Amino acid sequence: MDQPQRPPQETPLKGVRTNIVQSIRAFHVHDLQDAAAQLGQHFLYANLANAQTKQDVLDMIAAQFTFPAHFGKNFDALYDCMTDPLHKSGPQPGFIVVLEQIPATAKFDKEAREQLLDIFRDAADYWNDRKIPFRCFYSFR
């Protein structure tokens, strides 16, 4: 006897625009990871709790996102790694990115935090132009 198909689970992203950078708020990291798997999208996660400086933030993102060894460790290189090489590698299913505990220190001040988030906003625009979902969620420490 045929089993009725279960309706697909609703993702916690229902109602969240496909190309956005926003506070993680009520989302839980594991729910976002599950949503990425359910949607067949890339899940990129960086816990920045131990970062103090811009260099720390870039080093941790590079390590946790497994960027290539030649990563330039500056904001321009971060943008490049989030866009061009991925685009050139073929069709992409979409991205869910989590930047957890972005530091709020004297060496990584409000301006540095905004520059970092602007990189991900620019990446969201890049992927939006290509009709590829790109959602980035962040929290501050």
Image: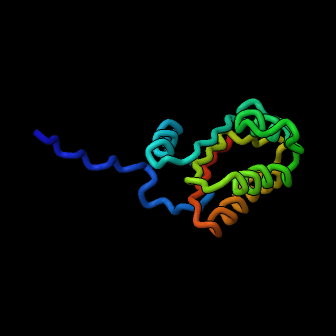
Instruction: Pinpoint residue 85: horizontal percent, then vertical percent.
Output: 76, 52
- Residue at point 73% right, 36% down? 66
84 and 49: which one is in front? 84
Quadrant location, the C terminus: top right
Label tally:
0
Query: Does residue 48 lie above or below 17 as drawn?
Result: above
The answer to whether residue 61 is seen in the rendering is: yes
Within the image, what quadrant is residue 48 found in? Answer: top right
- Identify the image quadrant of residue 87: bottom right
Task: Report the front residue among 62 and 3.
Answer: 3
Q: Is residue 27 above or below residue 92?
A: above
- Residue found at x 77% / y 52%: 116
Closer to the camera in the image, 132 or 55: 132
Horizontal side, residue 40 vs residue 103: left or right = left
Q: Position of residue 32 (x, y in %)?
A: 50, 43
Q: Is residue 22 visible?
A: no
Q: Is residue 30 above or below residue 38?
A: above
Task: Residue 119: give x, y in percent of width and height.
Answer: 76, 56
Q: Is residue 1 left or right of residue 43?
A: left
Look at the image and tell me in which quarter the N terminus lies. Answer: top left
Q: Residue furthest bottom?
A: 129
The residue at 46%/45% (across/down) is: 35
* In this rendering, position of residue 128 left or right of residue 10: right
Residue 45 in the image: x percent, y percent?
Answer: 63, 39
* Residue projecting furthest to the left: 1
